[in-house]
Structure formats: structure tokens, C-alpha cells
Image: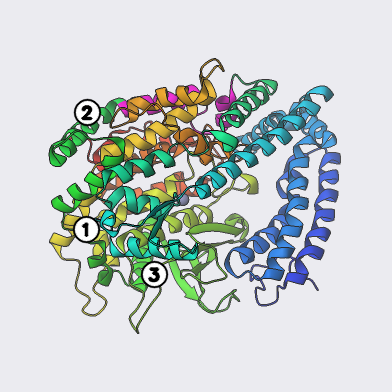
Amino acid sequence: MNPLTEIKFKIPFDQVEATHVEPAVDELLLDANQRVELAAADPNPLMAIDTMTERLDYALNVVRHIESVATTPAFRAAFNAVQPKASAFYSSIPLNEGLWKAIQKYAVSEQGRSLQGTYKRFLKKTIDSFKRHGADLDPAGKVRLKEIDVALSEATTKFSEHVLDATNAWEMVVTDEAQLKGLPPSAVAMARASAGSKGLEGWRFTLQGPSYVAVMTYLDDARLREQVWRAYNTRAASGPLDNRGLMVQILNLRREKAQLLGFKDFSDLVLDDRMAHTGERAQNFLKDLRDKTEKRFREENQELEAFAGSKLEPWDISYWAEKQRAALYDFDEEALRPYFPLDRVVSGMFEIFGRILGIRVTQVNDMPAWDPGVKTFEVRDAATGAHLGSFYADWYPRENKRGGAWMDAFLTGNPAQDRPHLGLICGNLTPPVDSKPALLTHREAETIFHEFGHLLHHLLSRVEVRSLAGTSVAWDFVELPSQIMENWCWERQALDLLAGHWETGAPIPEDLFQKLKRAKTFRGANMQMRQLGLGYVDLALHREWDGKEDVVSFSRRMMQPFAATPIPEDYAMITSFTHLFSSPVGYGAGYYSYKWAEVLDADAFTRFRKEGVFSEQVGRDYREKILARGDSEDPAELYRSFMGRDPDPQALLERAGLAR
Ligand SMILES: [Zn+2]
């Protein structure tokens, strides 16, 4: 028996071996292909479409997960061997002509036309998605679409290779120790080790994140900072690694693709099934926030110049901001650690959301896991006792586990049919050391809340169509349920439930809490402007750039209104902006989503603020109208049903300290 070929709620993690992966995926691909054919022959193909890849999805979820958290060379090889087959299968679905005909036929049938609610939406979304993938094109159009996709995938791969190579090609070696003034010892040691690894004397600085950030934040020598800043912001902008040509090619291909599929531009194609719907609306959203941020932005920069006592250049900003921060807030994140033992944070979180959402989370010990450190939990409805779902929590780093924090789904159930959901949350949090419990930073506690929010979106789903359940929602909506959770980490009453000194149980001292809050909004307008500028240039490139102006100078012109200082002539940050250009879609035309979701979460939280951060009334409403609904309704409608109105950016401005 291959443990991957049968869906099991208690996934046999203790039995899955690398040798199971290929045979299972091959078998399930055959199975899924047969189901696609069956769906195409079904007079009502909709239900079949919803479930035809379920077994394959399950096996691939488990395999992908093991590759992320408990990989071995053999497992990685097996994973890499099945990846191309699986993605080729998934992308073949919308181009299956038999299936497309069956859907169209069903859509005009009496049954298809009489669909209501979730099923009606599922039919429409299926048709739209098939069209966006080229199902409706004539044969020549389909050929061209395929050519475009191949060309895009090549150009975007080359774009990120250039960025990587350009980043690695640059170094600065300092041999005079006096020039290192200002750097913290850890950064000096890192630079020394870097030089040593290249057989060099002195200290070596690079454009890799940790080295770059340390120099820009701490190095006293402004001339060296300028050198590093210029190198960083002209990566892949000249010579053999110049990305200009690739950007032009990618933007043109994306526009051609959008127009081939009947859209005005690439942003309208990408945003068609997102909450913003059109590029114009997303861009106006950013403009509006820029206008509301501008005043405080200027003030912050005037305050910084006054503090520095001189006119500032772009490479001076982080440096002086750090000096100003240290002068204004003698706040050290580390001082909070003793108050956030992981077990207490987690049990406090379960208690808070147990109360608010009417659920009960309990640990269970009868589910095999991939590592002895993994814990398993069950979520039940507090009123009925119904089993809503279960999940795994894997908090600490390991060598065979990837970095970061994330949530994922294994199984999408249907509580109405007594089929619970199954999901997981993973992190790389500070592990326990020296017989002390794991002591977290405040930011780490927020991370746990964030991922738990994604998880609840999955576990509390009551959507009967699998494809529209849980977190399968628009990209600019999916971070609402996660980010909103972080708000509780800033409420004194809630903090007292999840934080307490690990030895004495004492709550966080009030002055420490106040410092934490003040430090949060330090230069909030600058942080916001940076994100707005990146989102704006992304949409401007995909909507407004017409090929006549040099793509780098166009980008510079678009970004200038969001910058704290005049941008130098050679500034070319855009040629290394991999978010936008390193995959066929990626964040292209979607970078605005970060801010969009922040507006939603800050605004939605105001209902809890007004009616009580522990309000069961608001909590039940939130569970019923947002968490339970997945993508069963237009997210804008879901939002309105919870708030009684459209989103208002005011709450975000207040939270970021911009509404004084
Ligand atoms: Zn998230």
C-alpha cells in the first residue's frame, strides 16, 4: 500500500518515504486525468470539476509539506521529479476543449441558468478562469498565448538570474579599521568572516541583505554609504547583466497577453478576479493614501533633517533615522522576551479567540507527525461540540525545515457533512535554550497570531464548494483574516492573557508597553510611502508606460513623489525589483495588495474597538460573515456584510500614527 494514494484524516506521516512519491503521483495523475474526462462527459460537470483533483491535491500537499519541514536529499529529488508533471497537468485543465464545451453547454442549460448562491458564483468563476487561461481563443490565438507564456517564463527567469549575478558581482573591501566606525560588532565580525572566506585581508561588504542593511543603518562614513547605496540601486542596470531590455520585453509580452484575452492591460487581467477588480481602482487607492500620508511624511523628514542638522541624501536616511530612533526611544525589543514564553502565548491566543469566536481548541495526541516537536490540536464549536477541524503546529527551526512562517491546508472538509478540515501552521521561532522555555519577541507573538488567523479562515469555513472554501480567496483579501489578528497583540487586555513573565507570571510593565507602542509608529509615514511608491510604480508600468520613454527613467519619475529626497539620475532600483519581474505573474500589478489588505484589517478591527475587543457579538458576526464564507461571495460584499459599509482607510492612518 502506498500511503499517499488514499486520503486519510490522520495522515500517516510516520510511513511516507521518498520512494512513495513518484509512484503515487503517477497513479494519481492517471486518476485525475480520468476524472477530467468523466467531468467533460458529465451533463452537470460543475461538481465533478470541484472534486476531480482532490486526491492528487492531497498527495501533493503532503509531499510539498514534507519537502518544507522534514526533507532529505532523496525526498527532494523525488519532489523535483514530480513537480513538472503536476504543474503541466494543472495548466492543461483550462485548455481541455471537451471540458470547456461541457461547461459552456451546462451554463446555458436550464439547470445551469437556475443556479443560485455559491454554485452560481462557482460556475461564473470557472468560466472566467477558463477564459483568462485562453479557453475561448481560436487555434491561432492559443498558439500565440503559449508562445507568450514560454517567452515570459524565459525572460522572467533571466531577469532574476541577472539580479542574483549583479548582487554577487559587487564587493567593497575595507582595509582601514577606522572606516568601520559606527558598525555594531556583529556586522564587523560578519564583514571580517566574509573577507576571510575569499582569502582577503580586511572587511568585505556586499549587496546581500544583512550586509547592505548594516552599512546603511550604522556606518558613520557617509562616502562609503553612498558608494554602497549607489551600487545597490544600480544593480542589473548596465553592462552584460542589464535588465532594461528584459523589462521592456516582459511588459510588452504581458500587455499583449492581456489584450489577446480581451483586457485593456495586464493590470486589468491580473485584477479581474481580485477585490480591486481593475488597475485603475487599485492605482487610485494608492494615490488617495499618498495624499493622506504626504503631510506627515514631509514633517517626519523635516524632523529628521533638523535632528541630523544637515541636508540629507538618500544614503543618509536610514542612518539618521536609526540615530533618531535611539534618541527618542531607549527601547530594546529583547526586554520583552521574558514576558512571552511560547506556551503561554499560544494558550492565551486560544483563550482569546475561543471566547470571541465561540470555539474550543484542545491538544490531541493521536495524530502521527513528521517530527517529535510537532503538536496537534482539535478545534470544536464551543456551543455544539462539533469537530470543525484539526491542525498541526510546528514552531521551531530545524536543519531540514525551510525558513519563515506559514499556514497551509491539507484537507478541505465540509462541516455540514461532518467532514472536518485539516491544516497546519509552521514557524521558525526562537527555540528554548539553557533550560528556559522558548521566549519570544513581540514580533514573534504577532507572527503566531497572523498564521493562526489564516488557519482559522480554513478551519472555520462552511463553504460547500471545495474550490471556493477557506483561504481560496482573492489575493488582496486573503491577508485580512491573518493581519486582523495582530491587532490583539497591541491591546492591553488581550496582552495580559498571552503575556506574563516566565518566572514570576507578572504582566508586562506599563512603561515597557507604552514604549513598544510609541516605537511602532516611528517614521510610520515613511514606511507607508515606501510601500505606496513600490505599488504605484508597479501599476504605472503595467498601465501607463507606452514604450516611448526609457523604462528606467519612467520608473524613476513615477517614484519621485514617494521619495524623501530628490532621486539621483542613475537611480535604477526597478531593474532589480524581482517581485515584479521574476516570474510570469508574481507580484506584477499586485504589489498594492499589501496596503489594500492593511486598510481592510485596520478598518475591520474598529468594530472590535468600538464594541469591545472581546465582544462575542462582533466575534460571531466576524466568524459567520467573513471566516465561514471563504470565496462563496464577492469579498467586497462579505466585507460590507460585516462592516455595513465599504472599507475606510482612516483606521490604517490612525494605527500608523498619521492621523494627528
Ligand atoms: Zn499572511
First along the sequence among labels 3 and 2: 2
Circle 1 Cα neighbour tier, 10 Å, few/some/many (<14 / 14–19 / ≥20): some
Q: Position of residue 349 (x, y in %)?
A: 36, 64
Give the residue displayed 85% in from the left and 45% down from the top.
38
Question: Would residue 514 appear left or right of 48 to someone viewing this image?
Answer: left
Which numbered circle lies on residue 295?
A: 2
Location of mark 1 (residue):
492
Amino acid marked by disc 2: Lys
Q: Is residue 280 magenta?
A: yes
Question: Would residue 149 appear left or right of 503 to someone viewing this image?
Answer: right
Of the two numbered discs 1 and 2 in the rendering, the one whose residue sits closer to the viewer: 2
> What element does badge 2 sit on?
helix
Q: Is mark 3 within 8 Å of ligand 1?
A: no
Which numbered circle lies on residue 430?
A: 3
Q: Nearer the viewer, residue 177 or 158?
A: 177
Asked whether the residues under the numbered discs 1 and 2 touch, taking CB atoms below 8 Å apart as contact, a structural biologist would say no
Question: Would residue 649 appear left or right of 135 to someone viewing this image?
Answer: left
Q: Position of residue 248 (x, y in %)?
A: 59, 26
Q: Position of residue 384 (x, y in %)?
A: 48, 63
Q: Is mark 2 within 8 Å of ligand 1?
A: no
Q: Position of residue 389 (x, y in %)?
A: 54, 63
Question: Would residue 358 appear left or right of 94 to someone viewing this image?
Answer: left
Q: Which residues are magenta?
A: 265-290
- Distance (Cα) linking label 1 and label 2: 30 Å
Image: 655 above or below 263: below
Check the picture and name the quadrant holding the C terminus: top left
Q: Is residue 415 magenta?
A: no
Colour pattern:
rainbow
Asked whether the residues under the numbered discs 3 and 2 touch, taking CB atoms below 8 Å apart as contact, a structural biologist would say no
Image: 352 above or below 206: below
